[in-house]
Image (tube, rainbow, N blue to C red):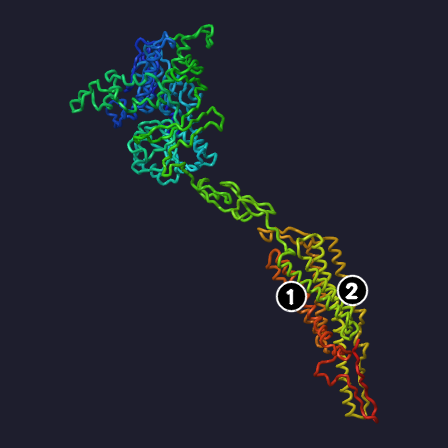
């Protein structure tokens, strides 16, 4: 039959059922056939006793290894590895029973007997002892109680949690009470599986929580765990992991201590401790299971670690008194159950007699290195006299300074005694049972005693501690101990705090940090983290495939901050804020605009004002020479409108400066667009006339050539009549008048004005905060409102510029002493060069310098037009006034066509006049 699919608990129950089957009843009287005999050691006193109390203690640590041999009858294994500490526990039960029997206020009419067995720290021995105790005789007969001795009341034991789980399942079948003093595993809290199990030691649920709170108290987030390979270790460390992992603590390594000797496993565990960066190691194990690992730790000289101990080994002399243990386990912090002073116990311990029982005999031989075995004496060992000075003994057995589990044994015996006392003193009129009668102390059923044990409340002698059970459990209270060194280099247990499960959550753990001695070079609280904490300004970046406690601290991106330690993510600053240099605070962005008061703003204002004044000065010069031919050569009004437009463009650039306001955004864009429209419309009007004059001059040249050709033909053929073509007159040269030019200027400007008005009404420019251009700055600028409008308006200005340039370019060859066509052409070329260069320069700059580039383009193009168009005229008006004559203003062809100029050709008087070429006057 395959049992591998069953749990260990079910397998145990199945084995028990099979063992029951092996015993068969042979007759009606119930005689039994024995199938096996157990080899149990312990104490027994049942003669002339009223009630028997059972006890089970792991006096030995393990079974003696034997070869499996089926050729001879099997025998129950012997035990080895005598444990002084647990032997003291067994003696404490004897002491408590003797104390109770000597009292007159507790069970005055009842003498308590006892049957105490050694479980050898193994489940098999614990089961053997349980079956034997239930049977009532040395040979165990499952499901039977043989003999007519005193009734068995309860079992105190059985030591470790694994042992109690095994015994509790068997005892629970008969509803037989069990009071444990050291089995703290949380599995035993189940009333369904272990209905008769009670204990005087706190549930490991409290201890696991206390350990977790201790780890969190010191901020340790990277710990290693080691647990014994039994229910005590597995369930205790499992609950600890659940609690700490919920709050972000990570487990560096998790190892298991084997129950059997395994040097390879110990080497592996020690290597894991060495290789791990965790400085905190939690050990959920008994001292027996931990001892082999201790040897390996000493071999590797593993220091600079802080060990967290459970109550099972924190006060174990087998660990703390090991030679050279201080460098390895010094500074250990552990949880211990309550400590007490038990008067008279030490005297009892020192009064044992080696001749009374085999356990005491073995103890005596080990302590005094002698023997009472005759065969061993013959082999040369010293013979024990029985009078050795035990009062001089100084070992774990006689050390009563740390009575903790020992105190639990004492309380467990008294709990059974008080339950029996309540049963004995029961009155029929107040019987709690349905029968209405009280049980007899000499013949009661286990379930009747179980009622009194569950509802028990008593005060422990000498300590005054009140004991009561809540579903078989006591309150979770632990003293927190620190392993420190005394003047002799020995380890002492110094209390540094306590844990109380009944206190409010924030007050459960109380620790005096200043009283702790740590096991490190700097003697200060160790740090146990996989990664150092991320400071403000960084965030935690989880490493792929590693625990969450292992992370990289990634700096927050620009514009993001983290103002807490170990931030999971960075916080994006608000729109008007930006991260500081440390990325731990959002600061107000720098507000940037081209201010009037800064040097660049002052410079641009000065240049703009200078340009406007220069245009005004030119206008004044023109006014003073208003009636001169040069001023009137191409409509003086257009010149003044051109200068007015330049003044507007110069001054409009000032509106771009300063903090953008609604009025400044509207004024700057509209004034610029309208000013350039006025300038370019005026230039277009002037250029149009110049173009028409150039075309007229070209027509005159063509007609003159034709006339010369006709004259030459007439000289060659006098008899032939040759008619010369008509020479165009003045009205043909100037087909448009100044009013037409002014109309062009007015219409061109008016169209722009209407467009700007519509723009201002529908989607006007307005000030905005530009937070996207530069991260650390808020750029105050004007939003154009609508891209279609702005493109349409400036596209119209470009159209006017192209027309003016085209007209002027056609008229560039029209020569007089002042060639205005060339001046306009050069002015427009400068205008185009400036604005074509402006585009890449504008796009490559940011912030207030974009405004500076735009103003520079406005000023440069305006100065270019002012200089190219008006400086030549001002030069003539101011420096060369003799050229300011009507004749100088006459347009003429280039020098190579001078012979065709405006001469008159006449033939001989007697010949017929062929043609007459009149002088063409081109003045205005």
Residue 402 in percent (x, y) is at 35, 23
Q: Is residue 339 visible?
A: yes
Q: Residues within 10 Å of mark 2 (few under 14, many from 20)?
A: some
Query: Is 783 in front, or is 312?
Result: 783
How many numbered discs?
A: 2
CA gap between label 1 and label 2 equals 26 Å
Q: Residues within 10 Å of mark 1 (few under 14, many from 20)?
A: some
Residue 734 in percent (x, y) is at 79, 75
Residue 357 in percent (x, y) is at 26, 17
Q: Is residue 35 above or below residue 853?
A: above
Q: Residue furthest top?
A: 429
Circle 2 SS class: helix
Asked if residue 660 lies left or right of residue 145, the reply is right
Q: Is residue 174 visible?
A: no
Circle 1 SS class: helix
Which of the 4 quarters of the picture holds residue 765?
A: bottom right
Q: Is residue 846 above or below residue 825?
A: above
Asked if residue 706 lies left or right of residue 407, the reply is right
Q: Residue furthest bottom?
A: 910
Residue 568 in percent (x, y) is at 51, 41
Asked if residue 669 lies left or right of residue 207, the reply is right
| Mark 1 and mark 2 residues within 8 Å of each other at the beta carbon | no
Which of the 4 quarters of the picture holds residue 6?
A: top left
Q: Which residue is mark 1?
A: 834
Q: Is residue 306 above or below residue 311?
A: below
- Indicate the quadrant containing the N terminus: top left, top right, bottom left or bottom right: top left
Q: Which residue is mark 2?
A: 746
């Amino acid at each position: 039959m395959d049992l591998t699919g069953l749990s260990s608990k079910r397998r145990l129950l199945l084995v028990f059922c099979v063992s029951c089957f092996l015993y068969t009843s042979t007759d009606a009287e119930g005689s039994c056939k024995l199938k096996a005999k157990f080899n149990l050691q312990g104490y027994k006193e049942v003669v002339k006793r009223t009630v028997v109390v059972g006890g089970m203690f792991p006096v030995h640590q393990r079974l003696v290894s034997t070869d499996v041999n089926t050729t001879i009858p099997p025998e129950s294994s012997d035990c080895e590895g005598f444990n002084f500490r647990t032997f003291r526990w067994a003696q404490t039960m004897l002491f408590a029973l003797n104390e109770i029997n000597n009292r007159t206020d507790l069970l005055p009419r009842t003498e308590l007997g006892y049957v105490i067995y050694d479980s050898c720290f193994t489940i098999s021995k614990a089961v053997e002892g349980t079956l034997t105790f239930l049977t009532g005789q040395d040979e165990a007969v499952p499901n039977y109680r043989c003999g007519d001795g005193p009734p068995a009341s309860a079992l105190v034991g059985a030591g470790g949690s694994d042992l109690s789980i095994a015994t509790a399942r068997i005892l629970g079948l008969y509803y037989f009470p069990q009071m444990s003093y050291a089995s703290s595993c949380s599995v035993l809290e189940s009333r369904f599986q272990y209905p008769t199990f009670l204990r005087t030691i706190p549930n490991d649920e409290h201890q696991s929580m206390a350990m977790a709170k201790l780890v969190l108290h010191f901020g340790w987030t990277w710990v290693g765990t080691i647990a014994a390979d039994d229910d005590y270790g597995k369930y205790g460390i499992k609950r600890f992991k659940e609690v700490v992992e919920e709050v972000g603590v990570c487990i560096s390594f998790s190892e298991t201590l084997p129950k059997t000797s395994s040097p390879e496993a110990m080497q592996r565990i020690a290597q894991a401790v060495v290789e791990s960066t965790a400085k905190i190691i939690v050990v959920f194990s008994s001292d027996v299971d931990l001892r082999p690992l201790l040897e390996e730790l000493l071999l590797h000289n593993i220091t600079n670690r802080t060990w967290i101990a459970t109550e099972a080994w924190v006060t174990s002399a087998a660990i703390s008194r090991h030679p050279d243990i201080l460098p390895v386990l010094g500074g250990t912090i552990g949880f211990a159950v309550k400590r007490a002073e038990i008067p008279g116990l030490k005297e009892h311990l020192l009064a044992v007699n080696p001749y009374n029982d085999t356990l005491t005999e073995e103890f005596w031989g080990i302590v005094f290195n002698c023997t009472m075995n005759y065969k061993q004496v013959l082999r040369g060992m010293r013979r024990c006299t029985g009078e050795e000075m035990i009062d001089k003994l100084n070992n774990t057995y006689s050390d009563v300074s740390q009575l903790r589990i020992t105190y639990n044994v004492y309380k467990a015996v008294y709990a059974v005694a008080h339950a029996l006392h309540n049963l004995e003193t029961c009155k029929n009129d107040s019987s709690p049972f349905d029968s209405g009668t009280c049980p007899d102390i000499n013949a009661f059923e286990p379930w009747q005693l179980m009622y009194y044990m569950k509802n028990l409340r008593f005060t422990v002698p000498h300590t005054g501690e009140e004991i009561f059970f809540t579903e078989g459990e006591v309150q979770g209270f632990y003293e927190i101990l620190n392993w420190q060194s005394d003047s002799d280099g020995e380890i002492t247990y110094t209390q540094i705090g306590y844990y109380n499960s009944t206190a409010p959550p924030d007050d459960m753990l109380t620790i005096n940090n200043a009283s702790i001695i740590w096991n490190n070079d700097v003697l200060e609280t160790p740090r146990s983290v996989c990664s150092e904490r991320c400071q403000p300004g960084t965030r935690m970046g989880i490493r792929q495939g590693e625990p969450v406690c292992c992370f990289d601290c990634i700096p927050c991106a620009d514009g993001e901050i983290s103002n807490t330690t170990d931030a999971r993510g960075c916080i994006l600053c608000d729109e008007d804020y930006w991260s500081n240099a440390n990325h731990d605070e959002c600061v107000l962005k720098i507000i940037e605009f081209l201010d009037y008061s800064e040097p660049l703003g002052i410079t641009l204002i000065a240049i703009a004002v200078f340009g406007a004044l220069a245009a005004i000065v030119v206008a004044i010069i023109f006014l003073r020479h208003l009636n001169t031919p040069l001023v009137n050569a191409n409509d003086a009004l257009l010149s003044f409108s051109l200068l007015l437009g330049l003044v507007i463009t110069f001054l409009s650039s000032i509106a771009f400066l300063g903090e953008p306001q609604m009025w400044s955004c509207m004024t700057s864009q509209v004034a610029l667009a309208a000013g350039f429209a006025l300038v370019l419309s005026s230039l277009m009007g002037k250029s149009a006339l110049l173009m028409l004059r150039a075309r007229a001059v070209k027509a005159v040249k063509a007609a003159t050539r034709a006339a010369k050709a006709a004259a030459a033909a007439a000289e060659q053929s006098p008899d032939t009549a040759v008619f010369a073509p008509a020479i165009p007159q003045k009205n043909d040269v100037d087909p448009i008048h100044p009013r037409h030019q002014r109309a062009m200027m007015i219409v061109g400007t008016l169209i722009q004005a209407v467009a700007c008005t519509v723009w201002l009404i529908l989607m006007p420019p307005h000030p905005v905060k530009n937070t996207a251009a530069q991260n650390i700055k808020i750029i105050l600028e004007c939003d154009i409102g609508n891209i279609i409008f702005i493109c349409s308006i400036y596209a119209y200005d470009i159209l006017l510029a192209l027309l003016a340039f085209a007209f002027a370019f056609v008229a560039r060859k029209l020569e007089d002493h002042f060639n205005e066509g060339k001046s306009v052409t050069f002015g427009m070329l400068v205008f185009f060069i400036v604005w074509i260069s402006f585009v890449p320069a504008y796009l490559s700059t940011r912030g207030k310098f974009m405004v500076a580039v735009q103003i520079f383009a406005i000023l440069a193009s305006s100065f270019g037009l002012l200089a190219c168009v008006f400086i030549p005229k001002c030069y003539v008006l101011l420096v060369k006034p003799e050229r300011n004559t009507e004749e100088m203003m006459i347009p003429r062809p280039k020098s190579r066509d001078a012979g065709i100029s405006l001469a008159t050709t006449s033939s001989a008087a007697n010949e017929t006049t062929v043609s007459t070429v009149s002088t063409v006057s081109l003045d205005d």
